[in-house]
Amino acid sequence: MTESATPLAALYSTSTLEHHHFNMTVAILQQEGHNILKHLSEEAYKQVLGNIKHCILATDLARFFPNRDRLSAVVENKSFSWSNLDHRLLVEAIAMTACDLCAACKHWDVQYKTSQVIFEEFYQQGDAEKVAGRTPAPMMDRDQPDQQAACQVGFMKGICLPCYKLLSKVIPQTKPLLQGCEQNTERWMQKASEVEMQRKGRIGTSH
Protein backbone atom coordinates (compact mmCIF):
# COMPACT_ATOMS: atom_id res chain seq x y z
CA MET A 1 0.00 0.00 0.00
CA THR A 2 2.83 2.38 0.87
CA GLU A 3 4.60 1.59 -2.42
CA SER A 4 1.38 2.21 -4.32
CA ALA A 5 1.19 5.73 -2.82
CA THR A 6 -2.44 5.49 -1.70
CA PRO A 7 -3.99 8.40 0.25
CA LEU A 8 -3.84 6.33 3.44
CA ALA A 9 -0.15 5.62 2.90
CA ALA A 10 0.47 9.34 2.52
CA LEU A 11 -1.39 10.00 5.77
CA TYR A 12 0.33 7.29 7.83
CA SER A 13 3.93 6.39 7.04
CA THR A 14 3.90 3.20 9.14
CA SER A 15 1.20 0.68 10.13
CA THR A 16 -1.00 2.33 7.53
CA LEU A 17 -4.22 0.35 7.89
CA GLU A 18 -3.78 -0.10 11.62
CA HIS A 19 -3.56 3.65 12.29
CA HIS A 20 -6.60 4.11 10.06
CA HIS A 21 -8.52 1.45 12.00
CA PHE A 22 -7.74 3.12 15.31
CA ASN A 23 -8.74 6.56 14.06
CA MET A 24 -11.99 5.13 12.73
CA THR A 25 -12.60 3.56 16.15
CA VAL A 26 -12.17 6.96 17.81
CA ALA A 27 -14.43 8.58 15.20
CA ILE A 28 -17.18 6.02 15.88
CA LEU A 29 -16.89 6.52 19.63
CA GLN A 30 -17.37 10.25 19.13
CA GLN A 31 -20.67 9.76 17.30
CA GLU A 32 -23.85 10.31 19.28
CA GLY A 33 -25.07 7.12 20.92
CA HIS A 34 -21.90 5.18 20.12
CA ASN A 35 -19.58 6.18 22.95
CA ILE A 36 -19.71 3.07 25.11
CA LEU A 37 -16.88 4.51 27.20
CA LYS A 38 -18.60 7.77 28.12
CA HIS A 39 -19.14 6.77 31.76
CA LEU A 40 -15.39 6.41 32.35
CA SER A 41 -13.36 9.12 34.01
CA GLU A 42 -11.11 11.19 31.75
CA GLU A 43 -8.05 9.34 33.00
CA ALA A 44 -9.64 5.90 32.54
CA TYR A 45 -10.92 6.92 29.08
CA LYS A 46 -7.41 7.84 27.96
CA GLN A 47 -6.05 4.59 29.39
CA VAL A 48 -8.63 2.46 27.58
CA LEU A 49 -8.08 4.29 24.28
CA GLY A 50 -4.33 3.84 24.70
CA ASN A 51 -4.81 0.13 25.24
CA ILE A 52 -7.10 -0.15 22.21
CA LYS A 53 -4.52 1.66 20.08
CA HIS A 54 -1.76 -0.61 21.37
CA CYS A 55 -3.75 -3.72 20.48
CA ILE A 56 -4.78 -2.51 17.03
CA LEU A 57 -1.27 -1.45 16.06
CA ALA A 58 0.03 -4.81 17.29
CA THR A 59 -1.82 -6.49 14.42
CA ASP A 60 0.76 -5.00 12.03
CA LEU A 61 3.01 -8.00 11.36
CA ALA A 62 6.01 -5.68 11.09
CA ARG A 63 5.59 -5.08 14.83
CA PHE A 64 5.31 -8.78 15.62
CA PHE A 65 9.01 -9.50 15.23
CA PRO A 66 10.34 -6.95 17.75
CA ASN A 67 7.48 -7.82 20.13
CA ARG A 68 8.33 -11.52 19.79
CA ASP A 69 12.02 -10.92 20.40
CA ARG A 70 11.37 -8.82 23.51
CA LEU A 71 8.89 -11.26 25.05
CA SER A 72 11.04 -14.27 24.15
CA ALA A 73 14.00 -12.71 25.96
CA VAL A 74 11.88 -12.12 29.06
CA VAL A 75 10.53 -15.67 28.98
CA GLU A 76 13.92 -17.28 28.36
CA ASN A 77 15.61 -15.50 31.26
CA LYS A 78 12.64 -16.42 33.48
CA SER A 79 11.94 -12.81 34.44
CA PHE A 80 8.36 -12.70 33.12
CA SER A 81 5.82 -11.36 35.60
CA TRP A 82 2.12 -10.67 35.16
CA SER A 83 2.52 -7.76 37.57
CA ASN A 84 4.90 -6.05 35.12
CA LEU A 85 2.94 -3.71 32.83
CA ASP A 86 5.48 -3.91 29.99
CA HIS A 87 5.31 -7.70 30.10
CA ARG A 88 1.50 -7.65 29.98
CA LEU A 89 1.57 -5.28 27.01
CA LEU A 90 3.92 -7.64 25.18
CA VAL A 91 1.58 -10.56 25.85
CA GLU A 92 -1.35 -8.47 24.59
CA ALA A 93 0.57 -7.70 21.40
CA ILE A 94 1.46 -11.36 20.77
CA ALA A 95 -2.11 -12.39 21.59
CA MET A 96 -3.43 -9.91 19.01
CA THR A 97 -1.17 -11.44 16.37
CA ALA A 98 -2.37 -14.89 17.44
CA CYS A 99 -5.99 -13.78 17.05
CA ASP A 100 -5.23 -12.24 13.66
CA LEU A 101 -3.68 -15.49 12.42
CA CYS A 102 -6.20 -17.83 14.05
CA ALA A 103 -7.11 -19.51 10.74
CA ALA A 104 -3.68 -21.14 10.95
CA CYS A 105 -4.93 -23.17 13.94
CA LYS A 106 -8.33 -24.21 12.67
CA HIS A 107 -9.43 -27.41 10.96
CA TRP A 108 -7.62 -27.97 7.66
CA ASP A 109 -10.73 -27.30 5.56
CA VAL A 110 -11.11 -23.88 7.18
CA GLN A 111 -7.39 -23.17 6.95
CA TYR A 112 -7.27 -24.04 3.25
CA LYS A 113 -10.41 -22.07 2.32
CA THR A 114 -9.13 -19.05 4.23
CA SER A 115 -5.80 -19.26 2.43
CA GLN A 116 -7.59 -19.19 -0.93
CA VAL A 117 -9.47 -16.03 0.04
CA ILE A 118 -6.20 -14.41 1.08
CA PHE A 119 -4.39 -15.50 -2.09
CA GLU A 120 -7.20 -14.03 -4.18
CA GLU A 121 -6.60 -10.71 -2.42
CA PHE A 122 -2.90 -11.09 -3.18
CA TYR A 123 -3.67 -11.85 -6.82
CA GLN A 124 -5.86 -8.77 -7.14
CA GLN A 125 -3.00 -6.70 -5.77
CA GLY A 126 -0.67 -8.45 -8.21
CA ASP A 127 -3.03 -7.66 -11.08
CA ALA A 128 -2.93 -4.00 -10.09
CA GLU A 129 0.87 -4.12 -9.93
CA LYS A 130 0.98 -5.52 -13.47
CA VAL A 131 -1.35 -2.80 -14.75
CA ALA A 132 0.96 -0.22 -13.15
CA GLY A 133 3.91 -1.76 -14.99
CA ARG A 134 5.46 -3.44 -11.96
CA THR A 135 6.35 -7.10 -11.50
CA PRO A 136 4.41 -8.57 -8.57
CA ALA A 137 5.97 -10.88 -6.01
CA PRO A 138 5.52 -14.56 -7.00
CA MET A 139 2.90 -15.14 -4.28
CA MET A 140 0.87 -12.25 -5.73
CA ASP A 141 1.06 -13.52 -9.30
CA ARG A 142 -2.03 -15.53 -10.22
CA ASP A 143 -0.02 -17.05 -13.07
CA GLN A 144 2.12 -18.85 -10.48
CA PRO A 145 -0.39 -20.81 -8.35
CA ASP A 146 2.25 -23.46 -7.63
CA GLN A 147 3.83 -20.92 -5.28
CA GLN A 148 0.96 -21.18 -2.79
CA ALA A 149 2.08 -24.19 -0.76
CA ALA A 150 5.69 -23.07 -0.44
CA CYS A 151 4.56 -19.58 0.56
CA GLN A 152 2.28 -21.01 3.21
CA VAL A 153 5.04 -23.23 4.61
CA GLY A 154 7.28 -20.18 4.92
CA PHE A 155 4.50 -18.16 6.54
CA MET A 156 3.57 -20.89 9.01
CA LYS A 157 7.17 -21.61 10.00
CA GLY A 158 8.32 -18.00 10.03
CA ILE A 159 5.40 -16.31 11.77
CA CYS A 160 2.55 -18.55 12.92
CA LEU A 161 4.47 -21.30 14.71
CA PRO A 162 6.82 -18.90 16.55
CA CYS A 163 3.79 -16.85 17.62
CA TYR A 164 1.83 -19.77 19.05
CA LYS A 165 4.89 -21.41 20.59
CA LEU A 166 5.67 -18.22 22.50
CA LEU A 167 2.05 -17.65 23.51
CA SER A 168 1.75 -21.21 24.83
CA LYS A 169 4.80 -20.67 27.03
CA VAL A 170 3.16 -17.67 28.69
CA ILE A 171 -0.41 -18.98 28.60
CA PRO A 172 -0.27 -22.81 28.62
CA GLN A 173 -4.02 -23.03 28.00
CA THR A 174 -3.39 -21.87 24.42
CA LYS A 175 -1.36 -24.99 23.54
CA PRO A 176 -4.23 -26.44 21.42
CA LEU A 177 -3.73 -23.46 19.09
CA LEU A 178 -0.09 -24.44 18.66
CA GLN A 179 -1.05 -28.06 18.00
CA GLY A 180 -3.55 -27.04 15.33
CA CYS A 181 -0.95 -24.81 13.71
CA GLU A 182 1.59 -27.64 13.71
CA GLN A 183 -0.90 -30.00 12.04
CA ASN A 184 -1.72 -27.47 9.32
CA THR A 185 1.96 -26.77 8.75
CA GLU A 186 2.47 -30.49 8.12
CA ARG A 187 -0.36 -30.45 5.56
CA TRP A 188 1.17 -27.49 3.74
CA MET A 189 4.56 -29.19 3.74
CA GLN A 190 2.97 -32.27 2.16
CA LYS A 191 1.34 -30.12 -0.52
CA ALA A 192 4.63 -28.32 -1.18
CA SER A 193 6.38 -31.68 -1.61
CA GLU A 194 3.68 -32.83 -4.03
CA VAL A 195 4.02 -29.64 -6.07
CA GLU A 196 7.80 -30.06 -6.19
CA MET A 197 7.48 -33.69 -7.33
CA GLN A 198 5.05 -32.64 -10.07
CA ARG A 199 7.45 -29.89 -11.16
CA LYS A 200 10.34 -32.37 -11.38
CA GLY A 201 8.09 -34.76 -13.28
CA ARG A 202 7.28 -32.08 -15.85
CA ILE A 203 10.97 -31.28 -16.23
CA GLY A 204 11.78 -34.98 -16.67
CA THR A 205 9.18 -35.50 -19.40
CA SER A 206 10.30 -32.39 -21.27
CA HIS A 207 13.78 -33.85 -21.92
Image: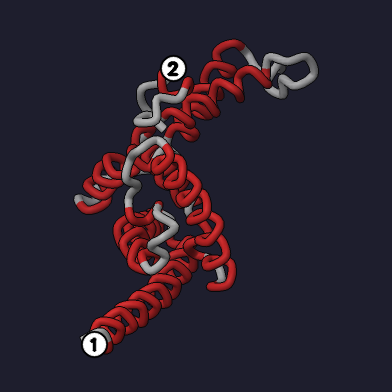
Q: Secondary structure at mark 2?
A: helix
Residue 207 is left or right of residue 126, and the answer is left
Compared to residue 175, the image places residue 130 above or below, namely: above
Q: Nearer the viewer, residue 87 or 68?
A: 68
Q: Point out residue 182 in the picture as x, y percentages from the top left corner.
A: 40, 71
The dot on residue 115 is none
Mark 1 and mark 2 residues within 8 Å of each other at the beta carbon: no
Closer to the camera in the image, 66 or 89: 66
Task: Tell me residue 83's x, y (percent).
Answer: 39, 38
Question: Could you tell me residue 207's position as x and y percent?
Answer: 20, 86
Is label 1 or label 2 in front?
1
The amino acid pointed to by label 1 is Gly
* Residue position marked by numbered label 1 in the rendering: 204
Residue 9 visible in the shown view? yes
Q: CA distance from mark 1 to mark 2?
A: 52 Å
Work out whether mark 1 precedes mark 2 in sequence or the reverse, and give the earlier one: 2
Query: What's the residue type where badge 2 is placed?
Result: Leu
Disc 1 residue crowd, few under 14, some 14–19, many 20+, Cα 10 Å = few
Q: Quadrant of the N terminus?
A: top left
Secondary structure under tag 1 reads: helix
